[in-house]
Image (cartoon, rainbow, N blue to C red):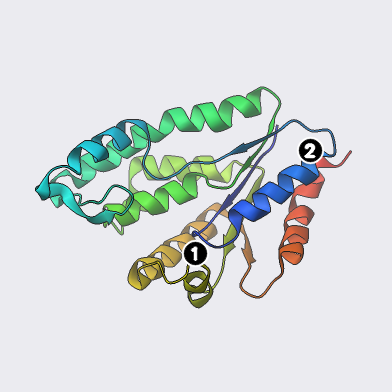
Amino acid sequence: MPIVYLFGPDGSGKSTLAGMLIRRVSKKGFKVKLSWMRGTHTLASILARFLSKFPTFKGSDNPYYGIFIPSRIKRLWQLIEFMSVLPILLYRFMLPSLFGYTVIAERYLPDFLVWVSLTTRDEDYLKRLEARFMLALSMKADVKVYVTASEAELIKRRKGEVNRDFLHRQLKLYDRIAKLVGAHKIDTTESSVEETLNELLSLVQPLVAT
């Protein structure tokens, strides 16, 4: 069954669009599952909580856990993140699709790749073997949608609670990945929710036409 995924920065409108899309698709009689993935999962999450207790690892590289990833373990941490996301990918995305669900994701592998690249301060992360594997997997989804907005609008929506430099680097990475995977771009800066939903529905309609 189809996998439809939305990706992009926080505040762009992914969750709102995904929720509305699910309601529309469900009305057509399809079994639908909302799935998502964040940056740090399972083993990496446990390690991050543990490392946050030590002064050496305290920092803002990973803002959710308040940790800093030293350069000497950067590559190791990337591999730990990769191994940690695999069970999530299988359980929340692959298996539901195999069991006949239309999977709609409000976060997917592109979001994970941006997260790992930023938190390990590795501009070349997308060239790593596991990153290329995840990019290739991202390309195989049925509908790929990059949901974004201008920097000024994202800062406004998040009420200023965002580092401008971090956001700038984040958007550059998202733009790059969107081109690599061939995603359709939806800019919500000046569009209404209804307008962006209609744009999204036009992409999904061929998959769910009855």
Residue 164's x, y, as percent?
Answer: 37, 72
Q: Residue at x 25, y 40 (%)?
A: 48
Quadrant in which residue 52 is drawn: top left
The residue under label 1 is: 175
State the image coordinates of residue 140 (x, y, percent, origin top left).
Answer: 59, 41
- Tell me what residue is drawn at x 36 percent, y 31 percent: 42
168 relative to 46 in the view: left or right = right
Q: Position of residue 25 (x, y in %)?
A: 78, 42
Front disc: 2 or 1: 2
Vertical order, 91 against 45 (above or below): above
Determine the image quadrant of residue 49.
top left
For the residue marked with disc 1, what is the amino acid? Asp
Tag 2 residue: 26
Does 201 sit left or right of 115 as displayed?
right
Residue extending furthest toward the top = 99
Judged from the image, the secondary structure of the residue bearing numbered disc 1 is helix
Amino acid tagged 2: Ser
Q: Quadrant of the N terminus?
A: top right
Along the viewing direction, whichever of 52 and 126 lies nearer the viewer: 52
Quadrant the C terminus occupies: top right
Q: Which element is circle 2 on? A: helix
> Can residue 207 be seen from the camera position used here?
no
The structure residue drawn at horizontal position 86% and vertical position 42%, both measured from the top left corner, is 209
Percent coordinates x, y for residue 34 in the rendering: 63, 38
Residue 109 or residue 20, whichever sits in front = 20
Residue 89 seen in render: yes
Q: Is residue 145 above or below residue 207?
A: below
